[in-house]
Amino acid sequence: MTENASVTAPQEEATATVMSTETVVSTETVVSTETVVSAEEMPKEVEDLLEALRDVVDPELGVNVVDLGLIYGVDLDENRVATIDMTLTSAACPLTDVIEEQAGEALKDLVTDFRINWVWMPPWGPEHITEDGREQLRALGFNI
């Protein structure tokens, strides 16, 4: 059995179960977003997926979803199916289809399939934005 490559982003190290409405997909150990994961610790496959997801741009803010801190976790199973735990700046955002379409385009050469698991806990806040994301927002005229 091949292990899944994943990085997940709750507040503390814990065990998480990724669930769909029909079935449990996987159970795994997760890594805190508060912990900086070095390139040696992060599986190469997950690093590649996160780099590709930098091409997915929030249509309202004009900054990629990785640097906005919207990606809470990435799981790549042995069949190269990616599950992405992602949130939005607002639960009322009507642009999930646009983001899913961009993600499909960004990941098409890296995975056989993917799904976005929209999550709302913990709620997104500006503290999740990376320094690169902050610089991009400042360049667009945002005061952050």
Image (cartoon, grey):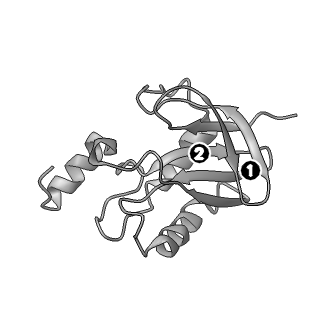
Q: Point out residue 93 in the picture as x, y percentages from the top left corner.
A: 40, 70
The secondary element bearing badge 1 is classed as loop
At x 72% / y 60%, what residue is drawn?
21
At x 43% / y 54%, what residue is drawn?
54
* In-image side of 70 versus 8 (left or right): left
- The N terminus, quarter of image: top right
Q: Residues within 10 Å of mark 1 (few under 14, many from 20)?
A: some
Q: Nearer the viewer, residue 18 or 65?
A: 18
At x 40% / y 49%, what residue is drawn?
123
Give the foreground label among 2 and 1: 2
Alpha carbon of mark 2 to alpha carbon of mark 1: how far?
Answer: 12 Å
Q: Nearer the viewer, residue 103 or 28?
A: 28
Q: Point out residue 65 in the picture as x, y percentages from the top left corner.
A: 41, 55
Three-letter code, disc 2: Val
Q: Residues within 10 Å of mark 2 (few under 14, many from 20)?
A: many
At x 79% / y 44%, what residue is drawn?
78
Q: Point out residue 3 in the picture as x, y percentages from the top left corner.
A: 77, 33
The secondary element bearing badge 2 is classed as strand
Quarter residue 44 falls in: top right
* In-image side of 61 versus 74 (left or right): left
Mark 2 or mark 1: whose residue is earlier in sequence: 2
The residue beneath circle 2 is 74
Total of numbered circles in the picture?
2
Three-letter code, disc 1: Arg
The residue beneath circle 1 is 80
- Look at the picture and state if 83 lies above or below 96: above
- Look at the picture and state if 114 lies above or below 127: below
Q: Nearer the viewer, residue 93 or 110?
A: 93
